[in-house]
Image (spheres, grey):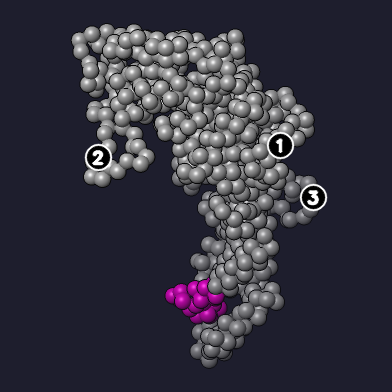
Amino acid sequence: MGRYFRRKLLLYGITFFIAVTINFAIPRLMPGDPVSRMLSRHSVANPESSQALRTYFENLFGFDVPLWQQYLNYWTALLQGDLGVSIYAFPASVSSVVMDALPYTLALLLPSIILSWFVGNGLGAMAARNKWLDNTLLPIGYLFTAVPYMWLAILLAWLGGIILGWFPVAAGYSLALTPTLSWTFVLNLIHHWFLPFLSLFVVALGGWAIGMRNLVIYELESDYSNYLRSLGAPQRLVRRYAFRNAMLPQISGLALQLGVVVGGALVTEVVFAYPGLGSLMLNAINSQDFFLLQGILLFIVIGVLVFNFLADVVYVLVDPRTRLGLEGGQS
Amino acid sequence: MALRVEDLRVHYRTMRGDVRALDGVSFELEDGEIMGLAGESGCGKTTLGKSLIRLDERMRHVGGTAVLDALELPIGDDRAMNRRRYTDVSIIPQYSMSALNPTRKIGKLTADLLRAKGRSYRQLRPELVRRLELVGLSEKVLDNYPIELSGGMKQRVVMVLSTLLDPSLLIADEVTSALDVSNQKAVAETLVRFRDLGFVKSMIVVTHDLSLVYQIADTIMIMYAGQVVEKAPAETIVGSPRHPYTQALIGALPEVGLEYGDKRLKSIPGRPPQLLNPPSGCRFRERCPLADRRCAEDPPVVRIADDHVASCWKVTN
């Protein structure tokens, strides 16, 4: 198994290298010149001082050296944890801007994904053996999964924020407050957090429940379930086996979902004006801030790779079948 | 008498109505008897095997009884049947390759199953190991996942597992169809050995492979379109069958040592009747070379010898 993981790590290493390289290339291939944008923002009329400013900026962002040098510099800086300076939030560094937004995204996505996973799997497994639940829960689940997410989010914001007036419809916390570690502020955070969380939770819930229901039904009809029943095994045992086996794909599904967490839920954050990575990414694109964009994409790449690797590890631990394949046994 | 089945009727529920897969099946099975159950696809042989242990969701017990060891089997009552399953009736399923939970070690699986049946795994383990060794498997397979075993090994594990509680009746459902010829022979011999060692009292071997079942069975019962057509000692069925269908079936088998060259093997013309609305009278009459007007009535069961019965107008003592 050690060999398998070493090989996997190597593979992920190569993927990381390629991803970083693409990450370096894409913004430079994009149309538009961020430096002239910044110059126009500073509205310098004098061509001489404009030229001086341009030289200053190009030096600051490292555009004054050949491309291969830029590439090497990029890697060197990256390995030192330096992602450059943001153009959009100049002169803040990219890492600090990303780090400011990251907690909001994680606080929004981790609970919604994990909670919906647990609740969804539970409901799905119950629906698999309960006709009534199957006939009520599943259509609702299908509805929530099929509805365009943006529409659902707007509907929720409208319902909870405007009609009922229970929740604020925008921002991560009330702008009347200064962020401190006090109860008022924390409660305010939770108050703002709830609606976007709910929208993500509800949508993911249906998907997990439907998937789990189908998986459990499939397992309950499989040969080993029939064999156990033929030998008079109680329903309890048959269901326990079916549930455990049905969980396997769900576990790797969860790990994959967690991988994209870092990318944030762009639509959610836009609809609820939530200050996470998603909104940040949108801002970065709008203001052609490609250092920031690179920084965010790098985080996404790392997140996806780490959690994919985790999914591989978990899957190998929980499913003996994969283990055998790795060791080169017969299938 | 180990098993006595009388007028058993089991139907499949379909959208178009009931399919009469078993339509009045009666037979007896002696203690220690290995009975081969043969017939072409759709004749009801698998349904009969299943009926004696577990009806699936689409099957419905319509009438008739099966008495095992002087106690009636509650065929239609899934819960009540649970008490008889495994301890009294057991099965080696058609799908032995996939009969074991792929994510559970074989030892653990056995322990789970035995505990659920109120037996102690620790007490039965020595016997389990002894029987595994008997079929050429080491104790180590208990620590293996099913996927780590070959197809033949899985088959043997299932055979040992199914018979661990010394059931009175074992149903072996097409156990050899998925195996290569050398494994087929080994499995067939193992079945006989299990009977000889007293692991099972009597056995029904469901198969479409007459030549294989001939080697191990004491008696052979032939079914056609949901009914029994003939039951006799294996020698008699193969050597001097009386029912026209059995004769045609045996006639369609290739014989070892004969050169066939360009000659085609004989086959039975026509197809078996639909069981949704089966014709009255003898169900084979459409394809029978001997059929006449009398065959439109239900044929009598003729007892040719003590151990030989056939349902046909043309058979006489």
The residue indicated by pointer 2 is: B264
Name the one closer to the observer, A3 or B161: B161
Inspect the magenta stretch and tell me whether residue B287 lies in it. no
Is residue A120 visible in this depiction of the protein? Answer: no
The residue indicated by pointer 3 is: A182
Task: Please name the residue shown 57% across and 47% down the image.
Answer: B150
Q: Earlier in the sequence, mark 2 or mark 1?
A: 1
Give the chain letter at badge 3: A
SS at mark 1 in the image: helix
Counting from the top left corner in percent of width and height, residue A322 is at 60, 52
- Amino acid type indicated by mark 2: Arg
Name the one closer to the observer, B235 or A261: B235
Proximity of marks 2 and 3: CB atoms separated by less than 8 Å? no
Drawn side of residue B278 relative to residue A41, left or right:
left
Q: CA distance from mark 3 to mark 1?
A: 70 Å
| Magenta stretch: dominant secondary structure | helix
Mark 2 Cα-neighbour bin, 10 Å: few <14, some 14–19, many ≥20: few
Name the one closer to the observer, B18 or B96: B96
Task: Please name the residue shown 64% across and 43% down the image.
Answer: B136
- Amino acid type indicated by mark 1: Arg
SS at mark 2 in the image: loop
Q: CA distance from mark 2 to mark 3?
A: 93 Å
